[in-house]
Image (spheres, coloured by chain):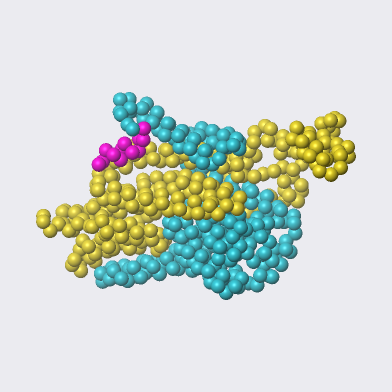
Amino acid sequence: MADRITLTKNDRFSVALRSTFLQGSWNYERMQNGGWCFAMIPAIKRLYTTKEDQVAALKRHLEFFNTHPYVASPILGVTLALEEDKANGAEVEDSAIQGVKVGMMGPLAGVGDPVFWFTVRPILGALGASLAMAGNLLGPILFFVLWNVIRFGFMWYTQEFGYKVGMKITEDLSGGLLKKVTKGASILGMFILGALVERWVSINFVPVVSNVTLSEGAYIEWDKLPEGSEGIHQALSQYASGLSMEPTKVTTLQDNLNSLIPGFVPLLLTLLCMWLLKKNVSPIIIIIALFVVGILGHVIGLL
Amino acid sequence: MSGISIVLVVIVAFLAGMEGILDEFQFHQPLVACTLIGIVTGQLPACLILGGSLQMIALGWANIGAAVAPDAALAAVASAIILVKGGQGAAGAQTAIAVAIPLAVAGLFLTMVVRTISVAIVHQMDAAAEKGNFKMIEVWQIAAICLQGLRIAIPAAALCVIPAETVSNFLNSMPAWLTDGMSIGGGMVVAVGYAMVINMMATPEVWPFFAIGFCLAALSELTLIALGAIALAMALIYLKLSEGAAAGSAAGAGTGDPLGDILDDYE
């Protein structure tokens, strides 16, 4: 076994870099197959020297493949380990390699979606967006840098992890670790979503519910203030001590709702959207409908 | 816009289009794409605010199963170009978003076209594989990615060439009730993205965490980072406790990082 062909760290790193382009040729027939094969090329070149072996390997890796783009990395790692064994004469059937790929892509996609699309991205995105809306350039920079550090770190280390444990990973992933990561991400995600619904879905009902005339002394009496800066000073200190600016207290429908539960209407709206989506209403139709509701509601003076 | 700006905007659009399919670097996210367009057109402050606002709407946009979300890449690029040409500064952000979202919906059609063309491309790869031709497989892969880039770059270029007066006249001709109404609609549209995500993740087991998040968010003293830390802590506690309940003696030996312990066992 002195002349065992092994993949160098460089080979593996170049596979990881190429897997960035996994979805580049995403197509309706075999989905990520082109990108997968593209990523495997450095390994195939290293492991197989004869033309026919290379052709067979290329064809083997142009089969149907589809998963979350980042969790493809551990699958690549395992596949690299299997290919290395095969190139060194071990009895690894094509169907075994295919089986590992297909067997891992489903459950792993089930981890990738909630973890990356529904937990990390909304959290980093909301963080960056709230900075950006305040005009802070750090928002997009923070989002971009953190995301890519997390992403590439994850891709490289899970690919190495997959390579090291080879076949063992499939056993483990069907067990505890997979479930834990998914559940942890769901908890994190649901919590943050609750917060986002409260903070960022905005509906404001403008109709006035009541006009209460305040008693004397409860509001600032503008005409009795002294002239100039002295007057401004007095007005501000009165305002700070809780006096109203106007002699009447206007309560809108929104104020009433807010004193009940802040964010109650956004919550109802979100639940309504969830229900419509479950009824297979296209999100695009819902989005258009909400714009129409916004315009009509504004015209009749409700929103 | 000057010639150089247009070229740079088209390059940003190309990157956004590539990323719209790759989903790796996130150049297609409004936060990044709008900021980059702001930099190359010299209107950074307005575009930054636009990017933040649009990002909030697009947070939950992800294609899951049969549900297809609007194309974030086109929404980001188109709204930024419209904002720059409209010349209203940050005040025009809501209107630009309202105009860009229908475009983003139309953009889905372009995505479908490119994904269909890619079927032909992978057949070329098959042919190249048959001959053991590594180079050609790589060339076709890169060609497919470039097509995805052009998907956004071409509409962006078209938007750039339309005279600025046309865009600003169009925006100014919209009555206030319409633009205000669309802003109000935009405030509600955020809910759709969240609803898509919740539908994916919700189980009876995790709903209580949604309720806690919802209530704590009303405390405006808590920043998003603080909320994230609370969420992470609760997730770890919950996992640890349910692990202890499930496996009695198995718990307790860990370092407080259940994931790390499992990974360590492989070393």
From the viewer's perspective, is residue A118 above or below residue B4?
A: above
Please provide percent x and percent y for residue B146: 44, 68
Please name the residue shown 40% across and 63% down the image. Answer: A25
Please name the residue shown 26% across and 56% down the image. Answer: A9
In the orientation shown, which residue stands out farthest toward the right? A223
Left or right of residue B154: residue B94: right
Q: Is residue A7 magenta?
A: no
Q: Nearer the viewer, residue B203 or A282?
A: B203
Please provide percent x and percent y for residue A259: 69, 32
Please name the residue shown 33% across and 52% down the image. Answer: A156
Left or right of residue A41: residue B99: right
In the orientation shown, which residue stands out farthest toward the left? A2
Please provide percent x and percent y for residue A92: 19, 53
- Where on the picture, by quarter, is residue A47? bottom left
Q: Colour of chain B?
A: cyan
Q: Nearer the viewer, residue A294 or B8?
A: B8
Q: Is residue B265 magenta?
A: yes
Which residues lie in the magenta part? B256-267
Q: Nearer the viewer, residue A116 or B7?
A: B7
Please provide percent x and percent y for residue B90: 65, 57
Please name the residue shown 39% across and 68% down the image. Answer: B142
Q: Which chain is yellow?
A: A
Judge whether residue A160 can be spotted in this image.
yes
Q: Nearer the viewer, residue A215 or B150?
A: A215
Left or right of residue A251: residue B72: left
From the viewer's perspective, is residue B21 above or below residue A142?
A: below
Q: How many labels, in total?
A: 0
From the viewer's perspective, is residue A276 above or below residue A6?
A: above
Quadrant containing the N terminus of chain A is bottom left
